[in-house]
């Protein structure tokens, strides 16, 4: 997770496989041609919230299990 939607932004925390991600906002970074999502990560092992921040959408939803699809690329 990062502080802002950028690959060079400050890292706030690390999520692992099977951690729960709840997200509610999408941001498209034109310079990187990358979708980011903003949300909260909760650790599966102990239920502790890691924090809230931005992550690359495909990392937040690697198995495409979220019913909300990625928005179309803005013009």
Image (cartoon, rainbow, N blue to C red):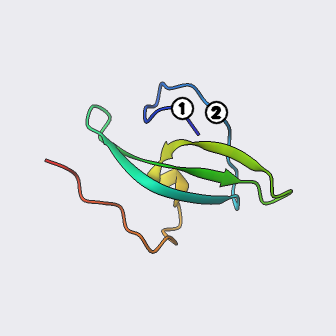
User: Horizontal placement of 50 versus 6: left or right?
Assistant: right
Answer with the quarter of the image where residue 18 lies. bottom right
Residue lying furthest right: 46
- Up the image or down, 22 lies above or below 50; here it is below
How would you rate the neighbour count of disc 1 (Cα within 10 Å): few for under 14, some for 14-19, many for 20 or more? some
Element assignment for label 1: loop
Residue 51's disc number: none
- Up the image or down, 28 lies above or below 20; here it is above
Q: Give x and y (percent) for residue 74.
A: 19, 49
User: Horizontal placement of 50 versus 65: left or right?
Assistant: right
Residue 13 or residue 49, whichever sits in front: 49
Total marks placed: 2
**Cα gap from disc 2 to disc 1, whole angstroms:** 6 Å
User: Horizontal placement of 30 versus 65: left or right?
Assistant: left
Residue 71 or residue 33, whichever sits in front: 71
User: Horizontal placement of 57 versus 47: left or right?
Assistant: left
Whichever of labels 2 and 1 marks the residue nearer the N terminus, that label is: 1
Could you tell me which residue is drawn at 32 percent across and 34 percent down?
32
Instruction: Read off the residue under disc 1.
Output: 3
Instruction: Read off the residue under disc 2.
Output: 12
Q: Give x and y (percent) for residue 29.
A: 32, 38
- Up the image or down, 51 lies above or below 20; here it is above
**Label pair 2/1, CB-CB below 8 angstroms:** yes
Element assignment for label 2: loop
Could you tell me which residue is drawn at 53 percent across and 52 percent down?
59
Answer with the quarter of the image where residue 33 lies. top left
Could you tell me which residue is drawn at 67 percent across and 37 percent down?
13
Could you tell me which residue is drawn at 56 percent across and 25 percent down?
10
Residue lying furthest left: 75
Q: Give x and y (percent) for residue 60.
A: 54, 55
């Amino acid at each position: 997770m990062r502080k802002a939607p950028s690959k060079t932004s400050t890292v706030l925390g690390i999520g692992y496989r099977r951690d729960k991600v709840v997200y509610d906002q999408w941001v498209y970074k034109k310079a990187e041609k990358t979708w980011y999502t903003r949300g909260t990560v909760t650790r599966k092992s102990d239920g502790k919230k890691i924090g809230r921040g931005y992550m690359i959408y495909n990392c937040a939803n690697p198995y495409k299990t979220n019913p909300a699809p990625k928005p179309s690329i803005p013009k």
